[in-house]
Amino acid sequence: MIEKIAYLQNLGITAVELLPVFQFDVQDCPPGKTNYWGYAPVSFFAPHQAYSSRRDPLGPVDEFRDMVKALHKAGIEVILDVVFNHTAESDAAGPTICFRGVDNTTYYTLEKDRSRYADYAGTGNVLNANHTVVRRMIVDSLRYWVESMHVDGFRFDLASVLARDETGQPIPNPPILWDIESDPGLAGIKLIAEAWDAAGLYQVGTFIGDSWREWNGRFRDDVRSFFRGESGSVARIADRLLGSPEIYGHKEGEAEQSVNYVTCHDGFTMNDLVSYDRKHNEANGEGNRDGADANHSWNCGVEGPTDDAAIERLRSQQVRNFLTVTMCSLGIPMILMGDEVRRTQSGNNNAYCQDNETSWFDWTLVETHGDLHRFVTLLVARRVQRGTQHEWQRISLTRLIRQAEKTWHGVKLCRPDWSYDSHSLAFEATLRQEQVRVYLIMNAYWEPLDFELPPVENGPPGAWRRWIDTSLVSPEDIVPWQKAPSLACPTYRAEARSVVVLFRKSETPETRM
């Protein structure tokens, strides 16, 4: 990890979210496989020993801290994916490793007749997280990783499990969530919730607490749906672009409450999202029954790899579409390792037991897809620059939207098409402090569309500049902000299934280019 810090810095990454590092059971998987992801915790206070190059007891601790220090020195925060919803002991047929042998009825939630384990995580058991003893253990674990290991935050796997009581019922004010939020030792720590569980409790937008950010699963689904041409998705993607006020506006929270992503470890990679219509998990040994069936994916005409140059161009264009919208939307953008170079898992959308080339990062892709790597680097650079400049601001999402000068357009100015069969939209916004006007065009239609450009009052010809056009080949698909070419026409042709970002600056002494 330390050896790859330079790569992360060059890409512009400001925080890494690591899959579980708690000591876990590598045998919690089908026979002949290896648990690769780590969602099978055995101890909440020990870094996984196999991740260390040393075999002495302190090796994993020392090397983990060395990694955190090196990342911090590079200006990169460390966020841990933590699993407090279940353990590797699974159901009654699972091994007795830890808590079952200590106090089974305290640590686990049981069914009403107490003969079986409740299972809201889809793993065989769930921790009784709101029991006094378990609450103390969870908070102590978090404090250990903050105070002794110096991490910056946590992403809580299936966090809605923590919102259930000992009978499995959701409760309005879960004690464990308020313990975490109010503990002085965790003040200022980033808290991110995967705000759902495997038993149907879905709390995106309603997760309990004031300091929690959330993985926005609706952003993922709606952006995927829009760019694969689903009807009825225009209004939804418009809301996602603005930080999902439909979901979060009632909380008067910060714009950063929404963690926006299109892909994560759990599901297709971005390359596979545009290359497969269905999952291909046969290698997991579970008869392709594991993994999600609803992926909102589109293979662009051929299932899997192809030598068809036109399809490959379309796939690369779709990847750029997803990345552009993710990075240009209000909220915290998150990208999956390798999406910047089209890493593939050959259609496997649940590679938890694939400790092999399926899951590993193929570093030759950095050269093979150097054009996409360049695209992401320039895209992130502009986002990071803006984020750093305004990091001091703490303004509520509803206020941000209310104060912004924004206008929705269609192919005609001020005439957005919100109909069910619409597949295109344009958005104009003024960033007052930067004195920049931005024009974003999203065309998910299967034919090119000509969009009228807003007139520039007292502006010279060509005042609009093109920053991004995902339909163009590198290096024209994205250019450095200062080198964006001027446009002289009153309209802009957005090619089929493309995203375009234009901008112009005010001609004042402070902002002249």
Image (cartoon, rainbow, N blue to C red):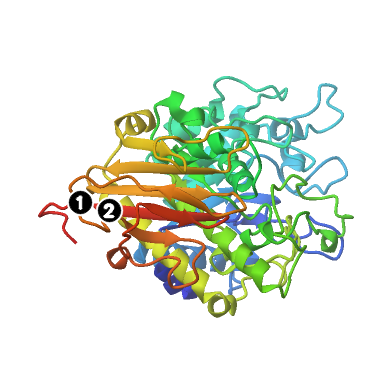
The residue lying toward the viewer, choosing from 295 and 393, is 295
Give the amino acid at mark 1.
Gly
Residue 504 circle label: 2
Kindly state the secondary structure of the residue where label 1 is placed. Answer: loop
Kindly state the secondary structure of the residue where label 2 is placed. Answer: strand
**In this rendering, does residue 78 appear at all?**
no
- The location of residue 185, given as percent across then percent down, is 40, 40
Question: Against 183, is 351 above or below?
Answer: below
Question: Against 270, is 243 above or below?
Answer: above
- The location of residue 445, given as percent across then percent down, is 59, 49
Q: Which residue corresponds to the image point at 63% horizontal and 55% vertical from the top-left?
A: 265
Q: Which residue corresponds to the image point at 44% horizontal and 46% vertical from the top-left?
A: 329
Q: Which residue corresponds to the image point at 37% horizontal and 36% vertical from the top-left?
A: 407
**In this rendering, does residue 439 appear at all?**
yes
Q: Are marks 1 and 2 in contact (CB under 8 Å)?
A: yes
Q: Earlier in the sequence, mark 1 or mark 2?
A: 1
The residue lying toward the viewer, choosing from 342 and 130, is 342
Give the amino acid at mark 2.
Arg
Q: Which residue is mark 1?
A: 459
Q: CA distance from mark 1 to mark 2?
A: 10 Å
